[in-house]
Amino acid sequence: MIGGLSRKGTAEEFEFWAKLNVDFIMLSVAYDFFLNDANVSRIETLKERYGLNLLIHPRPDGQTLQSPANPDAHGLIFEALNKIKDLVHKHALINKVILHLATYRIPTGAYQAFTEEEAIVNSKPFYQRLKSFGGLNFVLENVYPPGIGWEELGYETEHFGLFDLGEDYEFCLDTGHLNLSTLAVNDLLGLPFELTCLHLHGNDGISDQHVPLMRSNFKQWKQIEALLSKDKYIVLEVKSNRDKIPHVLDYLSRNEIAP
Ligand SMILES: [Zn+2]
């Protein structure tokens, strides 16, 4: 299955991807998006109008500190997850909720700092509570390591062991984030989580550009090529250079994973 990225849940975004004949939209928005009834009814309407299923990827948000690293945000996040669960079951959405692990920000501008240690300590109760949250399948995604772009917690493969997660998660491999790290694809595939989702995008190796994935902007092409298959949820997680997207779709269809 092939999907496109929506960062606002707008008709323009749905229309853009519908014209490219993708199977679903991945909605990547802050948790409080789902606490707003107007937003929810708009995406319900757009789902039906364009005949596109939805995959939900709530973002830890730097401005609002909606991250497991912030203990004050846990209530809001769980409230949003309950709304997402209702939505998934009411509309038969793809039952996968993709999560970045805890995120902290350096103290610049509006961002408040959590140290890496604080992020880990604060997040543990969040993931313990998540373990008993039934009805949704959670998918963990790799993020790039601290020191590149915005400083965030992780992730090296060992970071996934810091939160007492257990093994009851799936895994989403984000190629753009991987390209900003020194990790090998196989290191991440060695995690005890089944790979069910791929976020395909590339960059210059310096910043998280979210441009269409090409041989020229991704270091471990062969390894990723081997992972492309119809049974995975493949998201073209593109924010710029959208005119190149048809080339990627054409490439994927020649590999017989037609959108
Ligand atoms: Zn991603």
Image: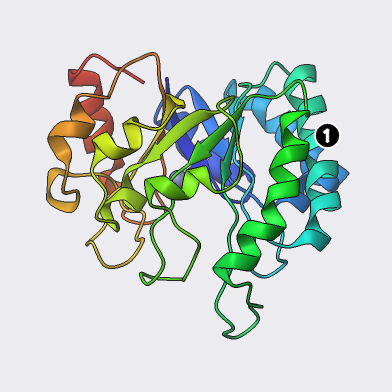
* In the depicted structure, whether residue 22 falls above or below residue 116: above
Q: Amino acid at mark 1?
A: Asn
**Residue at the image position 78 percent from the left and 60 percent from the top:** 71
**Residue at the image position 37 percent from the left and 72 percent from the top:** 147
Q: Which residue is mark 1?
A: 82
- Residue 164 in the figure: left or right of residue 128: left
| Residue 77 coordinates in the image, percent (x, y) | 78, 48
Residue nearer the viewer, 116 or 99? 116
State ligand 1's quadrant: top left
> Which colour assignment does the render follow?
rainbow
Residue nearer the viewer, 218 or 246? 218
Quarter occupied by residue 224: top left
Q: Quadrant of the N terminus?
A: top left
* In the depicted structure, whether residue 106 falls above or below residue 244: below
Q: Quadrant of the C terminus?
A: top left
Q: Give the secondary structure at mark 1.
A: helix
| Residue 69 coordinates in the image, percent (x, y) | 67, 60
**Residue at the image position 36 percent from the left and 52 percent from the top:** 177
Residue 42 in view: no
- Residue 225 in the figure: left or right of residue 258: left
Q: Residues within 10 Å of mark 1 (few under 14, many from 20)?
A: some
* In the depicted structure, whether residue 128 falls above or below residue 102: above
Residue 20 in view: yes
* In the depicted structure, whether residue 7 falls above or below residue 104: above
| Residue 254 coordinates in the image, percent (x, y) | 18, 19
| Residue 24 coordinates in the image, percent (x, y) | 52, 26
Total label count? Answer: 1
